[in-house]
Image (cartoon, grey):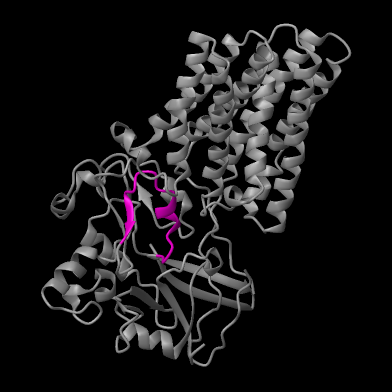
Amino acid sequence: MTRYIMVADLRRCVGCQTCTASCKEANGTPPGVQWRRVLDIEAGEYPEVSRVFLPTGCQHCDEPPCMEVCPSTATGKRADGLVTIDYDICIGCGYCAISCPYEARYKVDKAEFAYGPSSVASEQLRFDPSKIGVVTKCTFCIDRIDAGTKAGKVPGIHPEATPACVNSCLSGALRFGDIHAPDSAVSKLVAENQWFRMHEDEGTGPGFYYLWDKGAL
Amino acid sequence: MRQIALAKRQGFWDLRAAGNFIGGGTGTGLLMISAAAGLAGLEVTIPLLVGMGFVMAGLSLVWLEIGKPWRALNVFFHPQTSWMTREGILAAPLAFCTLGFVATGYPALLVAVMVLAGGFLYCQARILKASRGIPAWKQPEIVPFIIAIGLAEGTGAFLALGGEPSAAWITTALVAGLARAMTWRAYGQGLLDSKAPAGTLECLGSSTALALRAVGLAGLSLILLSLFVLPQPLAALGGILAATSGWGVKALIVTRAAFTRGPSIRHTPIRGRGVSRTVEA
């Protein structure tokens, strides 16, 4: 059975934020909402200091805590592992957002645009009133995946069926695909590298793998 | 090696959400002790109505907070796993039984009020515990703590509303207040043991938190004193202090102490000839 995951190779990520910009362009998210973020993390003390760029967002968990708490059933999970939000059912209570250990969810209560009250053409094109007053998050570009697979394309291989952030990644740090397909790039990367998943102790089974060194675990 | 802390205060639930926990806790606590007093033969119409008013006021505040208030009925869609749905489901029969008793005086309804109010309060505690993104809320000790606060608030409000307080109700309020003090201590220790975010620990150790604890203990002392002298004014005053300190504690926990875990890494990546470093949790 298909299980889509994202792989972020921390050795490759240069923190350019192109994925963030690409996501905002593709999904038309308002100011302050970043479904795909790249965090700039420091660890250690001088002189032993490391700087790590950490792409993050919805982890599309195996056991999503957001889905468990959602009182309206707006948050759901598909058989392919993608966690979804039905904007027509969501009541905007925000309970899912505070239940997410990855801070991946957003809620905006009124329409806002990058340059004040008047929206530019690209914002007008992407503006979706159904996303006001409800909770939103990264969808792994579910529409692209569905349209692409319907057209016979393979997510993670063909750009038409692959999330915008992965397509835009200039260093090849972000990869996407089906971890259950033995020949997929992501299943090979996970098998051949050492990785961790964030807040694994929560038992959520996040679908976001962070590679940090070669060699299988 | 340690990573810089990236925990931040949640911004999704504000004082309106805290108001639901305040109204729900005080209301259900008051309903439970009022129902018990009613079964013991006391006139409890006013405390019951006030208790139900608190619960409804709390729910109304939540209604004001949600992004799509006209879809509020969707809250009932997920009783399988959502404690918020379960809380909502209990509200209607709780109101029905409370108002039913006020209208008919049928004593069996008081038993139902006690059970439903207890269930509602338990749901509120579990709502917080299920919030996995907020360490201060998912701490297991939050459940007995929230229940004890609700009982302390409710019994305090009962003394504040009541006529001549008897030793039995004063003792009940004392026990609830002591339970709150004990569960508060256990909750704080649990947060320390589980290495809660620094912001959470700072908030719960702040002068505001200490003042709230002092107010609660002052209320408890007055309630204890009322067993021996001036029962009416001391019990009422102690009850008011017990209730208001509980409100402050909940407002603090929901709006100020609610920090996220923050993103974290387990290893730094190997680049070039560098080495990976393990990052402490």
Q: Position of residue A95 (x, y in %)?
A: 43, 45
The answer to whether residue B45 is above or below residue B189 is above
Q: Position of residue A10 (x, y in %)?
A: 44, 79
At x 49%, y 58%, the residue is A101
The answer to whether residue B70 is above or below residue B164 is below
Image quarter (top left, top right, bottom left or bottom right) of the C terminus of chain B:
bottom right
Residue A70 covered by magenta stretch: yes
- Work out whether residue B57 can be spotted: no
Left or right relative to A180: residue B244: right
**Which of the two residues, B72 or B112, is positioned nearer the viewer here?**
B112
The answer to whether residue A64 is above or below residue B107 is below
At x 59%, y 81%, the residue is B277
In the displayed orientation, state which residue is furthest to the right.
B228
Left or right relative to A22: residue B49: right
Q: Position of residue A72 (x, y in %)?
A: 35, 44
Q: Which residues are magenta?
A: A61-77
At x 63%, y 49%, the residue is B200
Left or right relative to B2: residue A199: left
The answer to whether residue A35 is above or below residue B161 is below
Image quarter (top left, top right, bottom left or bottom right) of the N terminus of chain B:
bottom right
At x 22%, y 61%, the residue is A25
In the displayed orientation, state which residue is furthest to the left.
A151
**Which of the two residues, B96 or B223, is positioned nearer the viewer here?**
B96
Numbered circles on residues, count: 0
- Work out whether residue A142 can be spotted: yes
**Which of the two residues, B241 or B85, is positioned nearer the viewer here?**
B85
Left or right relative to B50: residue B93: left
Task: Name which quarter of the figure residue B180 lies in.
Answer: top right
Residue B6 covered by magenta stretch: no
